[in-house]
Amino acid sequence: MKSRLNVGVIGLGRLGRVYAEDLTRHVTRANLIAVADTRADVAEIFAREYGIRKWYDNHRDLLSDKDVAAVAVITPTSTHKEVVIEAAREGKAIFCEKPISLSIAEAKQMLETVERSGVFLQMGFQRRFDAGYIEAKKKINAGVIGVPVLITLISRDPFAPPLDFCDPKASGGLIIDMGIHDFDLARMFVGEVKSVYATGGALAYSEMKSVGDIDNALVNLVFENGCLGVVQLSRNAVFGYDIRTEIWGTQGSLQIGYFQHTPVLVMTKEGITHDVVPHFMQRFEKAYRSQIQEFVENVLNGAQPSITGADAIAALQISLAATESFKRNLPVTLGMEKHEAGVS
Amino acid sequence: MKSRLNVGVIGLGRLGRVYAEDLTRHVTRANLIAVADTRADVAEIFAREYGIRKWYDNHRDLLSDKDVAAVAVITPTSTHKEVVIEAAREGKAIFCEKPISLSIAEAKQMLETVERSGVFLQMGFQRRFDAGYIEAKKKINAGVIGVPVLITLISRDPFAPPLDFCDPKASGGLIIDMGIHDFDLARMFVGEVKSVYATGGALAYSEMKSVGDIDNALVNLVFENGCLGVVQLSRNAVFGYDIRTEIWGTQGSLQIGYFQHTPVLVMTKEGITHDVVPHFMQRFEKAYRSQIQEFVENVLNGAQPSITGADAIAALQISLAATESFKRNLPVTLGMEKHEAGVS
Amino acid sequence: MKSRLNVGVIGLGRLGRVYAEDLTRHVTRANLIAVADTRADVAEIFAREYGIRKWYDNHRDLLSDKDVAAVAVITPTSTHKEVVIEAAREGKAIFCEKPISLSIAEAKQMLETVERSGVFLQMGFQRRFDAGYIEAKKKINAGVIGVPVLITLISRDPFAPPLDFCDPKASGGLIIDMGIHDFDLARMFVGEVKSVYATGGALAYSEMKSVGDIDNALVNLVFENGCLGVVQLSRNAVFGYDIRTEIWGTQGSLQIGYFQHTPVLVMTKEGITHDVVPHFMQRFEKAYRSQIQEFVENVLNGAQPSITGADAIAALQISLAATESFKRNLPVTLGMEKHEAGVS
Amino acid sequence: MKSRLNVGVIGLGRLGRVYAEDLTRHVTRANLIAVADTRADVAEIFAREYGIRKWYDNHRDLLSDKDVAAVAVITPTSTHKEVVIEAAREGKAIFCEKPISLSIAEAKQMLETVERSGVFLQMGFQRRFDAGYIEAKKKINAGVIGVPVLITLISRDPFAPPLDFCDPKASGGLIIDMGIHDFDLARMFVGEVKSVYATGGALAYSEMKSVGDIDNALVNLVFENGCLGVVQLSRNAVFGYDIRTEIWGTQGSLQIGYFQHTPVLVMTKEGITHDVVPHFMQRFEKAYRSQIQEFVENVLNGAQPSITGADAIAALQISLAATESFKRNLPVTLGMEKHEAGVS
């Protein structure tokens, strides 16, 4: 068992910086020794501020750095294929943020290279590391709610991303971009999905239409075991970040999620008021940290990845099928999709 | 303006007795002067206990009673057509519990007779009289959440009805029997429904299959104004009666519903626990009372019915389309149904 | 067992009208056959509206009415002595609203007459009939929280009564007027009180000082069994009516009370908001009804009163001792009071 | 402005390790370069695990270390005087955990030395750094609840500390040991305390009596501005760690605190259940981190301490007066104490 893992972070966008800061400050048994970003100044400034020894303006140089044993790939989705395949060829252990790709074919190509190279690959779906979801999974395994029969998953952002982020060519569209988290959880809690049906619209922000995206969607799921599910996606939860999951079993239900952010209740003539979780970092700050810590432990301990490439492909398949269903206004059976949505 | 309304109640099942008791004890400006039930002893015992002057073992005798000015029709759905049509011909003001019928053709026939007779008809959808739903409607009208774009409606019973009640020939099946309340609310809050898609299954009680019913269903709605909706129906909320509605607008959301029944929180080593609303009478006791009170007032004051026959037909149409969608596993556009579900 | 009880209500103030309406509309096995109020027009109008046969402009005439078997005494506290004593002499079963009196000597005199006359007397402390308090008592008896060791009782009004109601000569002052409910509950849950210490002030409404009353108080209790308690009284819960009790035992705690009145949660950029119980009638509507119903049953069934005159005196003694403690700024041991507070 | 502060931690008990870990992993602009504990092995093991360069088996050696610019004193209260005075003489910036001492005379001696030496001293009351308390203070300053008139503070531990920790000679007794946090908050929110009255008892754990401590107490406060307060202390909140504060103003109220720890609600036939904050580290983990971070910033930036020695003495005075009041069963006016409780 090695004592510490030398890690490099590729991509210093909002989320990349979170992972890099976690690896520097809070994660044990890891040394963040290198960062890379195509914006050279971003990489340098970040590296200097956090005392990171090396910085690069491209992922290739970082990947060929022999001191780096593992990389976290937090780049735009469209670049995942190239970066992950090169990382695998360089023999690095790989952590890759979701979604693995917008294309099943691409994703499969990535996994083949990873497998051939024999490197470790773990996918990022941070909600699985949230205390609430962990506890819910335990309770279900312990039989607390009997057999699950129905799952409801809500993901609502307090505002829409900048329009260019919403371009389905880059993001895959709302159903992939937001929904993939919920599809992953649905699989974790209930099992494989057999068919999907989705409706949606640009109902709150008409400018969404100009880039071809929507801001609200409902995705029905039928699981292979006969269970039912529905995923509710929205960009206009103006009050805050609203992430809820309910799992309904034969003997009870579980609700995961919470609203109140600051533990203060204000009681005035206007009623009783509290604030709300502002956005995803406030909700999943600890989960992101646990996730990258667990990646480090898994690599150092020679353990299996907790979230595999196959998991990533399964969640992507549901996302794509749902996107296709929305476009065709018909239920779509998985494995029977006509074409891959979002990249057509 | 007349000062008091002489009312007769037809049908003394569980809900009929509730209306009759409300009319005797709690409703002002009404005299319950007659009850009818095909079980003569039930009618007599009830009448004696509540001091009601007249009782009948059939609805015809009650309807031909000249002292009776108004009737509440709380009989099995399959008899609504006959009773309502005769009541109309006798010139009675009519309150009819939902659903109006399981057949659109039948329902239209009923409304034609009502119209020709010029009698007052008000339909029963008690949730509209719940303080929560009333307040939510007010807040939406006041613009508190901007423009509604998505609605979620949950109806969950704590247990399944006796199997013979579940026979879709009598009940119409889960989607009609339970869902019609939610479809009515959906219309009230968002508008007319354009198309539906439903999935479902007998997932908690396998004996449901023997009568051809299901115990869980998800119904997606697309409204004519482009908004989205989902209705979640379940018979296995073993913890209690779970009725929730969420309306998501461009400027905020409203959640209607509550869980805690008795205002006691128990804090022990097992955690913090409270009880739950047991069943629909505990949840909607006051709404049922307000509803029949308002019917009495509307008749006495010559006001318009707050819930019309057209409302009843609209909710039935959504229910039937959703049932058909479930059976065919395809989205169904309203007005384009192939055949009437539940009575095929 | 008689089948119905002929009742008269004496005093048609706000609360008297509530009891009278309950007896007319909602209570079973009772006939409200007479009302009395010193304001003749109030009595007549009320009687006509509710179809009550007899009305009087003084309590004596009602008490000498041979048809009246039982009376509810809802007059100002200062008149309780006279009315209750005369009612006892007339052989009526008596329901008397709290407080029995502002003077222990007077209260004892009343009870002596009641006892000599052999009539039934039940005191009004409606909180004991609230579903929350009933359930809490059951859970404590069942050992759910082990042995109670500490009790916290909060009573907060949303606004101050009209100044003339606050005159301690009439009301006894805040600690008696509001606190007596909490002292009664404290006895019910924990046992007899040994000593008290109270602080208070006119902190929110300076005009209180002009009549010699206060608007906030804290009363510490030490029980004979060594347990501790604190009663918190306030007139400035501007957001609504705030009634809470917590009982802390060796194995857990119970919290009784709730805030939300209408089951609607509003979620906007301002946060998540709900309304609050407006005032005592919304909080204890059902408890008042149950209480007078139970009185009727107890009289008809020859049962013992659930809340006795001795209970009333015990709660009054705590109130008076606490008022004295506040005035002297010293702990006061019950039975050792120097003088009776509030009527000095 | 210096860029980083070299810190030493003295005392590696449970809380000392928390501060030391925070300083190593999470606090920015600080280097933890030395630790000291009288248990040499504890110091060495901790230092090796966290990569701290120096460790000592006594505070003197650490204090004479010229590389150490600031120290966190997390030793038993009885040693605070000696350690703080020596630290001051060595010119170190000092962070000292509450309570400063159990004796006012001692505490004043400490502050005199600190002042003479001109060193920076900041006291530890971590609740002031909790997001809830910070937000509440802001809202009060913004006038959201008008003028505060009453404050309720609850501190309840889920279990009693080991008996030897409860010896009032070491801990000062329940009222000082637990209550001092609440007295500090009371001052922060409402102002200076004029008089106190306390009751208490060994009600849940009879073995407390053997060491002369109690497990439940109620402390009434009267503030110099006339406001009222009550502090409720308990060792038997078996369900979890229960920290609540309510501030009641002329225009509204604030409640600070929360119960639910993991965001999972379990809904079964037993009702709706959630878990509870287990103990103080789960509740105040972030507050401890913010507090020591702020100390580091204040020292580096030459800012004033946010919590002064005078604050520490004021909270201690209330604690001592309350302890005396409990012993004498009389209200005690601050500045008029007969003798110092807890160390008599």
Image (cartoon, coloured by chain):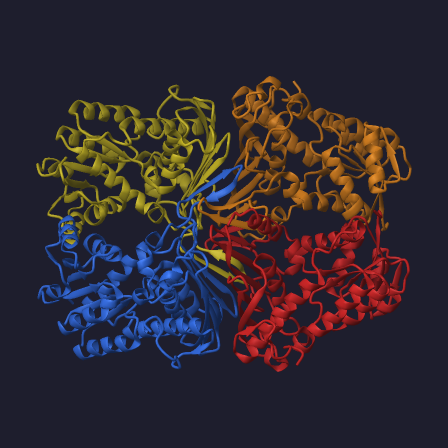
Chain colours: A orange, B yellow, C blue, D red
Residue at the image position 64 percent from the left and 53 percent from the top: D130
Residue extending farthest to the front is C210
Query: Is A163 rendered above or below residue C68?
Result: above
Counting from the top left corner in percent of width and height, residue A180 is at 63, 33
Q: Quadrant of residue C214?
A: bottom left
Counting from the top left corner in percent of width and height, residue D51 is at 86, 55
Counting from the top left corner in percent of width and height, residue C135 is at 39, 62
Residue A80 horizontal side relative to residue D260, left or right: right
Q: Quadrant of residue A156?
A: top right
Q: Where the C terminus of chain D falls, by quadrant?
A: bottom right
Q: Quadrant of residue B104?
A: top left
Query: Is B197 rendered above or below residue B260?
Result: above
Counting from the top left corner in percent of width and height, residue B68 is at 12, 38
Question: Foreground residue, C220 or B197?
Answer: C220
Question: Foreground residue, D249 or B38?
Answer: D249
Residue at the image position 17 percent from the left and 42 percent from the top: B29
Instruction: Specify whether residue A117 is in view.
Output: no
Instruction: Specify whether residue A21 is in view.
Output: yes
Query: Is C179 rendered above or below residue C114?
Result: above
Residue at the image position 80 percent from the left and 71 percent from the top: D82
Residue at the image position 55 percent from the left and 62 percent from the top: D154
Question: Foreground residue, D282 or A200?
Answer: D282
Residue C259 horizontal side relative to residue D121, left or right: left
Residue D256 horizontal side relative to residue D14, left or right: left
Please state the total of marks drawn on the protein image.
0
Residue A101 horizontal side relative to residue B43, left or right: right
